[in-house]
């Protein structure tokens, strides 16, 4: 019986979790910082780091008490070591190092993207490698061939904004508030997705990557033009993003005929229209479609603890000298592109 304590602090969610090797989440805590950042219309890295520093210790305390677990009973500590906002990553990693030092247990420095990539296996024990993962959040927009634990091939990434970042910026333009994704989705229900002609960057292109900057600029022009209401703009924007995601994912599926499933993770996967469109795509390829429940799709610590469990089960060894890394590609062989799908 292996029990791992996970810590996540790479963006604007402070999170801790206790996960057993048999996939049981004994307890977890997630604190969103939406209230901290909402007045600024986006995430302020300095405020995020401070909030993690204030919250992690009391959250750990409360979680261990709830689970009735003593720190000495934990077999390993796992903390996100990147990629992400460096101040927050350092807070989480140092917290993990302190716990590991105090207990004499190993520390696993986990790549946040590996957490997302393996999270579907925390929910579904039958999900076998290799599968195609579309990771779409505020910080990332990538297609990854997940071939095994520690074996990732990046098939595509964004050359500018992440999809969630585009949702957040469009929400700001429309005065819908932060975080923008859910607000845009709500507004879109009242609008006509065909009302505003918007570009679908790179759709139909043989190049594998994503791009949302041109779409965002076109939305800005539509807002400034004043001929369209917010609901129509939101609905048209959401339809354009959906088309981009489906087209790029279809291209990746053609490049990965060995895929056993199509999996989507990240905050944007909470969007009903996007989910339904991807499910349709998987069905056309006769593949199972999997999306972890929203609380495991967005940033959380259970996926970080689970990634350590997978590494332990695979017989891998922890990095003896982990560093906090603002950038940390899952696939070191992947060509760098302009935007790495990670918030700057
Ligand atoms: O995975 P996540 O919680 O954090 C990271 O960015 O890593 O994702 C948050 C992102 C935000 O950009 C948010 O606007 C977007 O996911 N999002 C959505 C929806 N819910 C959250 N985007 C579109 N539709 C939604 N319903
Ligand atoms: Zn994330």
Image (spheres, rainbow, N blue to C red):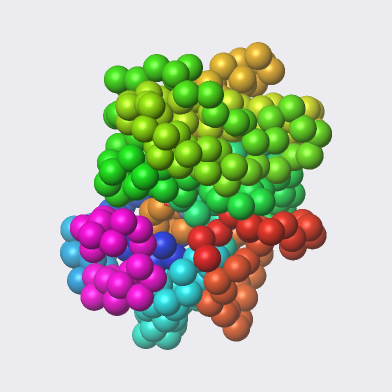
Q: Position of residue 100 (x, y in %)?
A: 43, 79
What residue do we see at 29% from left, 76% from top?
Answer: 50
Residue nearest the observer in this picture, 322 or 243:
243
Can residue 340 be seen?
yes
Q: Is residue 300 left or right of residue 263?
A: left
Magenta part of the protein: which range?
32-56
What residue do we see at 28% from left, 43% from top?
Answer: 175
In which quadrant of the rendered view does residue 313 lie?
A: bottom right
Q: How many marks?
A: 0
Q: Position of residue 126 (x, y in %)?
A: 57, 32
What residue do we see at 55% from left, 71% from top?
Answer: 326
Main secondary structure of the magenta stretch: helix
Q: Position of residue 279 (x, y in %)?
A: 54, 21
What residue do we see at 25% from left, 56% from top?
Answer: 38
> In the displayed structure, would residue 313 be above or below residue 245?
below
Q: Position of residue 125 (x, y in %)?
A: 53, 36
In which quadrant of the rendered view does residue 144 lie?
A: top right
Can residue 144 be seen?
no
Q: Is residue 330 left or right of residue 5?
A: right
> In the displayed structure, would residue 82 be above or below residue 122?
below
55 magenta-colored: yes
Q: Quadrant of the N terminus?
A: bottom left
Residue nearest the observer in this picture, 93 or 235:
235
Q: Is residue 197 left or right of residue 224?
A: right
Residue nearest the observer in this picture, 210 or 305:
210
275 magenta-colored: no
């Amino acid at each position: 019986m292996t029990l791992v304590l996970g810590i996540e602090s790479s963006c604007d969610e402070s999170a801790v979790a206790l996960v057993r090797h048999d996939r049981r989440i004994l307890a977890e805590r997630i604190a969103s910082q939406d209230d901290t950042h909402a007045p600024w219309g986006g995430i302020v890295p300095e405020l995020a780091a401070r909030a993690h520093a204030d919250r992690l210790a009391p959250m750990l305390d409360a979680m261990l008490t709830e689970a009735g677990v003593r720190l000495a009973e934990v077999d390993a500590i796992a903390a996100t070591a990147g990629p992400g906002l460096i101040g927050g990553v350092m807070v989480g990693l140092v917290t993990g190092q302190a716990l590991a030092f105090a207990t004499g247990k190993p520390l696993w420095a986990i790549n946040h993207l590996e957490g997302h990539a393996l999270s579907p296996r925390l929910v579904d024990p039958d999900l076998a490698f290799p599968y195609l993962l579309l990771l779409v959040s505020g910080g990332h927009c990538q297609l990854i061939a997940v071939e095994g634990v520690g074996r990732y091939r990046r098939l595509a990434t964004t050359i500018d904004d992440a999809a969630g970042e585009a949702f957040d910026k469009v929400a700001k333009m429309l005065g819908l508030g932060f975080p923008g994704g859910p607000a845009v989705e709500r507004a879109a229900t009242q609008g006509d997705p065909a009302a505003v002609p918007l570009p679908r960057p790179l759709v139909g292109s043989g190049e594998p990557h994503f791009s949302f900057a041109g779409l965002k600029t076109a939305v800005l022009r539509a807002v400034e033009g004043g001929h369209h209401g917010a609901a129509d703009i939101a609905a048209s924007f959401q339809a354009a993003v959906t088309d981009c995601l489906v087209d790029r994912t279809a291209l990746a599926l053609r490049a990965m005929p060995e895929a056993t499933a199509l999996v989507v993770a990240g905050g944007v996967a909470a969007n009903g229209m996007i989910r339904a469109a991807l499910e349709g795509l998987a069905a056309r390829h006769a593949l199972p479609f999997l999306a972890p429940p929203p609380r495991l799709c967005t940033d959380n610590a259970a996926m970080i603890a689970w990634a350590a469990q997978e590494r332990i089960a695979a017989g891998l060894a922890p990095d003896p000298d982990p560093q906090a890394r603002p950038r940390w590609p899952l696939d070191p062989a992947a060509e760098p592109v302009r935007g790495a799908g990670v918030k700057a």
